[in-house]
Image (tube, rainbow, N blue to C red):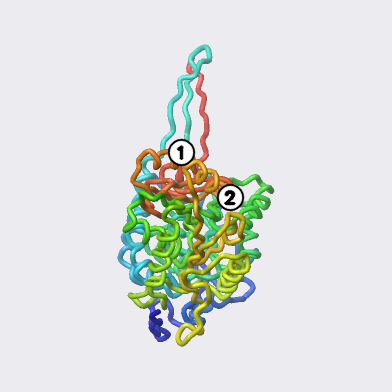
Amino acid sequence: MNVINKADAFQHPFLDGSTKRMYIDGKWVEARSGKTFATYNPATGKVIAQVAEGDAADIDLAVAAARRAFEGPWSRFKPADRQRLLLKLADLVEADMENLATLDTLDMGAPITRTRGNRARAVGMLRYYAGQATSIHGETIENSLPGQIFSYTLKEPVGVVGAIIPWNGPLTASIWKLGPVLATGCTVVLKPAEEAPLTPLRLAELCEEAGVPPGVVNVVPGHGETAGAALASHMGVDKVAFTGSHLTGQKIIRASAGNLKRVSLELGGKSPDIVFADADMAAAVPGAGMAVFSNSGQICSAGTRLFVEEKIYEEFTERVAEFSRSLKVGNGLDPDTQVGPLVSSEQLDRVSGYLKVGKEEGARALSGGARLTDGDYADGYFIPPTVFGNVRDEMRIAQEEIFGPVLSAIPFTDIDEVISRGNNTSFGLGSGVWTQDVGKAHKLAKGLRAGSVWINCYQAMDPAVPFGGYKMSGYGRESGVQHVEEYLNVKAVWIKTE
């Protein structure tokens, strides 16, 4: 297996040695407490920067700024004005993409080829939401009441949004929250993950450069149990948009009860990826592998339960294991790296624990299976792509979200059986099907209880296509017109004209 390249001396214009402050009401400010926290390069274990540590006091200031902006100048922006801002921001993101991609890689470890590859998605989302800004409209409704009573609806912004994002894709996760906010006329307090706060802060600089008025976008780094909890329960917040674990999602729902704020949740998954014997093996082997190993398995919709038709189970799982062994694990800044480190030492411990549990439960590691500790891997958080065979449905590695590059291969015999077993999970975010039989494809697309079904592909995403979950994977949708609707209230208007 190839070793990583050293990149400790890498220079970045955003990383000038200063403490990174939070962005509130158009100003860069320190935390009220004066506290900071360190953010680390997961490939080396070294500190990248110190970041202002927000808490409830800073959230109060940010929410108040967002409310003033929502009720003040921002409310007078016309749809075309908001559209121009989004298009300007898209241009700035596109021009700064190399720096943004490198920040993502430095802060959370993803291969630079992946973060650079997010250009089309990041810029495309902003331009898509720019189009939606001028497409928001109500409808006239012919009611059945006697007399001349005219009825119609208005669609209006929900108000102040508390947005809480994860660390596994800081740039695109931030845009997924900011885009609909700016399109609809809401305002936002964004709480980035403490493991990867740098790109969201740089994005705030670009919002300022684009001309977004003070208070419309606020970014408050901090820990989930302090800043995040304060944002979720804040009485001045009208909606919370959260992406993260289902356990935190449950806490947010409870916290939202104080003022019955709107909530949308994109949570975890344990997605089935189903391979039939008639599948195109040349496509299905790398497709099934990268459904898990992409972003080091740190993707909520990763296809971590690989169901393989029994007649090809041994051959297919060995081919996937062979594919996994061919992937280069290393520092994300190396352009040859295909699998980077996990985001933190805590995540490393979590995934390592599941590797141990899988072996104790009787699964067999066909590839990987242990942390990489030799040479340049020693100080980073590296787990190689791991394929477990001999997996049974009831094993913890087949039931619980690991959030690492760990694939569980499970045999099946017929289509009805695999639909039932594929749905036998508390989650329902993603799913995959590999077959050349269009009848099987349609039956699985209908039968799987998941928000996305990818057939002969995996993790395909587009700004116009909605994404979200069933069951414990949350509710609400991101991307598509459905996403914009999550940030709008509908008002009915009645006019008696006679």
Sequence-wise first label, 1 or 2:
2
Disc number at residue 446?
1
Q: CA distance from mark 1 to mark 2?
A: 17 Å
Helix, strand or loop for disc 2:
loop
Check the image and name the residue furthest to the front: 311
455 w.r.t. 198: above or below: above
x%, y% of residue 326?
37, 72
- Residue at horizontal 36 percent and vertical 78 percent from the top: 334
Please name whichever residue, 158 or 72, is drawn nearer the observer in this view of the structure.
Answer: 158
Quarter of the view holding residue 210: bottom left
- Residue at horizontal 48 percent and vertical 15 percent from the top: 148
Disc number at residue 425?
2
Quarter of the view holding residue 87: bottom left
Query: The disc labelled 2 sits on which kind of residue?
Result: Thr
Please name whichever residue, 458 or 86, is drawn nearer the observer in this view of the structure.
Answer: 458
x%, y% of residue 125?
37, 53
Check the image and name the residue furthest to the top: 146
Quarter of the view holding residue 209: bottom left
Helix, strand or loop for disc 1:
helix
Is the residue marked by circle 1 packed among few (<14), some (14-19), or many (20+) residues within 10 Å? few
Query: The disc labelled 1 sits on which kind of residue?
Result: Lys
405 w.r.t. 432: above or below: below
Is the residue marked by circle 2 packed among few (<14), some (14-19), or many (20+) residues within 10 Å? some
x%, y% of residue 366?
48, 69
Q: Quadrant of the N terminus?
A: bottom left
